Structure formats: structure tokens, C-alpha cells
Image: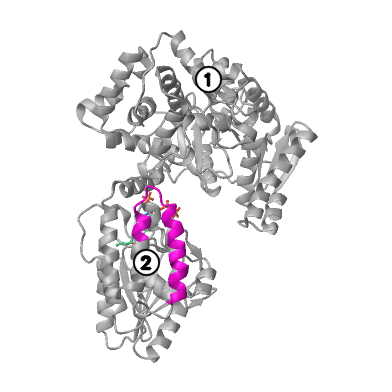
Amino acid sequence: MPTVTLARHGEVAVATLDNPPVNALSATLRGDLAAAVVQAMADPAVTALVIAARGKAFIAGADISEFGKPPVAPLLPEVLESVENAGKPVVAAIEGVALGGGLEVALACHGRVASPAAKLGLPEIKLGLIPGAGGTQRLPRLIGAAAAFPMMLSGEPIPAQKALALGLIDRLVESDAVGAAVALARELAARGAPAKTGGRTDRLTAADREAFEALAKEALAKSGEMPNVPALVEAVRGAFTLTLAEGLARERALFVALVADERSKALRYAFFAEREAAKVPGIDDSVKPRPIARAAVIGAGTMGGGIAMCFANAGIPVTLIETSQQQIDKGHARVRDTYGFSVKRGSMSEEARERRMALITPAVGLAAAAEADIVIEAAFEEMGVKREIFGALDRIAKPGAILASNTSYLDLAEIAAATSRPADVLGMHFFSPANVMKLLEIVRPAGVAADVVATAIALGRRLGKVPVVVGNGFGFVGNRMLEARTRAAERLLVAGALPHEVDAALTGFGFKMGPFAMSDLAGNDIGWRSRKARGKSAAVADALCERGWFGQKTGRGYYRYPGGARTGERDPEVEALIAEVSASKGVSRRSFTAEEILARLLDPMVNEGARILEEGVATRAGDIDTVWLNGYNWPAWRGGPMHWAESVGLDVIVRRLERQARESGDASLEPAPLLRRLAAEGKGFFAVRAI
Ligand code: 3H9
């Protein structure tokens, strides 16, 4: 089947791209498009060409799966040169998204028409790249670098309306974008030789250069680890200083170097891992999700309020339930205040806040959940409390309603057993702050119905989350691995490291915060309570809590926070206390390099990840990485813990764990059988599929 078909609208040819699911510019599509351009230009009866597309996307960009493989001709820049220099006008009819190479196709055209649903963007930056088919040259020439650069720097697409205002598209039409593009093509043909975007310089004024340089300076100061930001600046600057041909050549060279960079590879890996996580064994297209028109959230604490906001943001009415008027008033006010921050920042209008608040109905008592198609419980993290709520919901909720718990550790089967309808019960684990964090762990206890899981996945996507289906084991995927890291961090303190050294090693790796700064922020008492409930202990962490040093909220934790400071400073008393703990355990303290600290923090996480995979709690290693990238701020360019482990070498991790286990006498550090086996066989985690 050809991916491009040519048809005629009078004397205008229309090339329609059809490469499902998103018209990515694969080698075949590039070849077919190039051939269609040649054919249309060679036909004396054709005066102009329209490029249109079938399906939900105009073009989603280059085919990302081809990156890193030997390039196959024709390359996109060559195809686009043939479009720009076609001799007859070429007009893009953009319905749906025009992203990356897709927008670059449109930029090489001589005119652009879009429908209101169209979105236009250059998201290459999110893949560790820069536009590589003329985007850095043609977009500044079309709309000015001061407008073009932020689009490329953020990677966020803009709506058609904004594109019109910027001059990125020529016309915005309510319907029949193809018809309107044909009309524009005809007008351009009547005017004679088409004007090339690449030939323009009128937008590249001195004032535009100055504005661009200021934005570039700011971006470079914040670019951190990512080499693509300096590359983007250099490429865009070329629009001012180089000819089009030179600018395109420089852009290409920078792009090709970035494609080979490990950081971009990790980001591309994460893109596909996230999409693969949406494919769940036993849940195919034949399993239809249940309709969700109304939701209820039980518990209006920070978590419950945040979850209710997710529904309101997606336009789904939600009842927020508490046990008393006072509690619900407090929770409801907190939601209003949280939206208030966005209004203050200017990212949300007052009217949008009111629209969202109107979708949230505060209520007292579980009876208010009777009309909901899905109820999400976000009450106190205690089995007794959860079972009582689910027992009551069983009597109250309508037949077919989905009953979900936001528990972060507890056994969903035990919660489900408190109802007479366990097939309707599952976990939907949001991450704090729930209205911001993208991860949604969907916990699948053994007895849950397939359509309930399918509903949770579909709902998750509707809420703008990244859903990952996980098995029902203590802490599921994310928190179970986090606990392994927490134990490792405590072990490091006892062995000789100090909190700031451990935190610095992790921020040096790319995390925004280290484990101790994080714990101080969240409250050290949370872990303390959980340890006590499970009969566990952690000498240093427990000692801090016994002194009431719960973290930022008490002004002291692993660090001191004088005068309510948000960043902690070293606390000599804590450091002395840590030394005492080491002495009481007979440990002679020694110093650790940042590299050693990292290995000791991360290797046990990978080990736990291997166990999770072995037990089938995660379907595949990519799911584990998707959890860590979207719920725990694992640095995106490192691709997630399992991807990172492979880059280190599983054999190296096995040897390091063996040494740690030997030195500490802690059997939990012995390499998991799966990890050992894969290392011995020279295989990676990605050869494993648990289910
Ligand atoms: C680029 O263009 C470089 C150029 O400047 C230079 C070149 C020389 N390639 O997300 P979904 C697949 S860089 C290959 O679930 P949605 C995806 O894997 C590229 N595959 O749907 C999935 O497959 P499957 C710049 C792609 O409706 C299916 O399509 N472009 C690509 O939620 C559906 O995807 C981007 O970065 C691709 N480019 O969202 C855009 N895109 O079903 C990346 C999608 O087998 N794409 N697939 O799992 C997106 O942002 C979203 O996919 C999109 C649709 C908004 C298009």
C-alpha cells in the first residue's frame, strides 16, 4: 500500500499521507512523498500541490524508531528542499498535530492552512535533540527568532489560533482545511513563482536578534546536563549569521551528533517505554472500558484534594467527601488555594478556576458517593480504616461502580475482600502532588475484572496521567524500590557518610533532591510510623524522630531549617548522633566517594527492580522505568533505573552488590536470582517479560 496518494482538485494536486497511526515520516513515507512532489511538478496540467494527511495527526514528526539505525534515503532535509524549490506552490493542510519533522514539512511549503484542532510544535528538545530538517532555520525566518526559539526550547505545541497570530499559518478555517488549502494554492499559483520561507530575512531584525540573545542567555544558564540547549542556540543563531544552505548544514551536523548522544538515546527509550506500558497483558481492544461520567473522592486531605483537581481539570464532575463539615470546608478551601497559585502565576484565569471549582461538589458522609461511576478512596493509610470504608461503599455505591483505593502500600485483595464485589476493586495510586505528578500506578489484585483495569487505564489517560499497571505486592513498584533506596541511605550514614554527602551524590546524578532533603520535606515521621507498624527500625531515622526532629515542619530533621528556611543547613548535633549510632553498632566510620555513594544507593534499587520483575509485579523493565521517570523525578536523560543499570552493566552491579552484602552481612543485598542469571548469560532486563 502506498503511504501517499495523489488526487486532483481541478488543476491543483492533493497528496494525502496515510501512514498510521500518526503519519510518522518513515523511510517509505519520505520516499512516497518525494515521488508525489516530483510527479505533481512534472505534470503540466498541475499548477500547485497540497500536502494533506489522513488520520488524527497531520504528521507526528520523524519516525523516532529509525534514529540510531543507518539512515535510509531520501533523508527528510532533501525531501523538504525539493518541496521548497518545487517551482510550483505547495500548501500544507494541517488537521491534527504537526510536530517535529511534521511541522518542518509545513515550513518548507509556501503556504499553510490549519483547522482549529491543529497543534503545531517542535518537540525535539524533549527527546534530547533539536529540529533536524530545517526547523531552526525556517521557523525564525517565518515568525522571528524571538518567537521561534521559545517554541523549540519548550517543545510545547501551540494551538492553531496562536499559530495564526504569530504568522506561522496563513489561514485558520473552521472546516475543510483541504478545500481551503486548495484555494490558497490556486491564489499562490496565480501570483507566479512561490515565495520561499527559507529565502526570507525580513523577520530577522536587529531587535529580534537582541531579544533572541537575551532568551538564549537565560536558557543556557538553566540548561544543566542537556547538550541540546547549547546546540539549539547555536543553530538558531545561524539563521542570523549564515546563509540558508550553511544554516541547514550546521543544524544537520548538530542534530546528527545529538542523535548519537546517550542522553538522547535514553529519552527516546523512555518515549517508547511509556507507550509500551499502556499495553497490558489480558487487556486488548476487545475489553471495553466502563463509562465514567461522575467521580467521588473520599478524603479531602492534600492527596484527595489533588485527585479531585485531576478530575475537575479533565472536566469530570467529582464529589469530594469528608467525615465532617469542618474537614470538608478545610479541604475544599485548600483546593481553591492551590488553584489560586496558578491564577497568581498567570497560568490559569480566574474564570478557569471557577469553572473547575464548580465541578467539585463538597460533601459530608459516604452516602454522597452513591451516584459516582468511580470512587477513589484517599483516606488514612491503615487497613482497618480502608476496610471499613470499602464495606460501607459496598452498600452505597451503585452497581457497576469502580471502587479504587489510593493506598501506597496496602494489600488491595484484603481491601477488596471487605466488599461483596471484589471484581470492581483495584488500586489507583496517585503521586504527590496529585494534580502535578504524571504517574498513576494501577494496582491489579488477582480478582479484579479486566474491564475495570481497562477503565482505570482509559481514565488515567483522560486525566493526563501516565498509567502503569502493576501487581498487588507491598509498595507495588515505586514505593517498594524507594524503600530499598531509603534503607540504603540509612546504611550509608551508619557506615560513615553524612546526610549532605549522600544528598549531593544524588543531586549530582541529576535528581532534584537527595533522600534526606526529601525526607525532611515530606516529614520523617511518615516513615517512622510505617516502620513501627511493621516492627521495623532504622537507627538514625528513629533517633531523629524520637527527638521530634521530623524535618522542615519542625525546623529540624537531617538538617536544620533556621527561621523556617526551605533549604537545610548541616546540623553538627545530627552528625554527632550519627557517629554515636555507628559507634554503638561497632562500626568504624569511613569516607565514601560520590561514586561509591551512588552505587550503594542505586544498586539495591535495581536489585529490588529485578525481584519485582521476577515476581511479575511489573510486566517489563520499561514499566519500572516509566514509574520512576514519572513519579519520582528520576532524571529523564538517564532513562530510569533499569535502563541505567544496563548502561553500567548488570555484571558490574552483581559484583558490587555481592561486595556490599559481604561487607554489611545484609542478605537483602545479595543479587536477585534474575539479576544474577541475566548477568551470567550476558543478557539485559529487556529480554524479560514477566507475563
Ligand atoms: C523529529 O521529528 C526530528 C526532525 O526534526 C528531524 C528529522 C530529520 N515516531 O503517543 P501515542 C507512535 S523528532 C514513531 O500513544 P497519542 C507511538 O509509539 C520527532 N512512532 O498517541 C504509538 O505507537 P504504538 C518529533 C511514533 O494520540 C502510536 O504512535 N515528534 C511517533 O497519545 C500512538 O502514539 C515527536 O516527538 C514518532 N514520531 O499522541 C512527537 N509518534 O501504538 C512524538 C507517535 O505502537 N509523538 N508514535 O505504541 C507524540 O507526541 C504523540 O505520540 C502524539 C500522539 C501527540 C503524536
The residue to which callout 2 is attached is 236
Question: Which badge, 2 or 1, comes first in the chain's sequence?
Answer: 2
For image coordinates 40% across by 32% down, the residue present is 618
Task: For label 2, count other residues whose C-alpha is less than 10 Å away and answer few (under 14), some (14-19) or many (20+).
Answer: many
Which quadrant of the rendered structure holds the N terminus?
Answer: bottom left
Which percent across, then down, holds residue 503? 45, 32
Q: From this viewpoint, is residue 168 visible?
A: no
Q: Which residues are magenta?
A: 205-232
Which percent across, then down, holds residue 322? 73, 34
For image coordinates 44% across by 24% down, the residue present is 498
The residue to which callout 1 is attached is 541
Q: Amino acid at mark 2?
A: Val
Q: Amino acid at mark 1?
A: Ala
Relative vertical location of residue 614 with respect to residue 53 in this rendering, above or below: above
Please report contact status of discs 2 and 1: CB closer than 8 Å, yes or no: no
Q: Residue furthest right?
A: 325
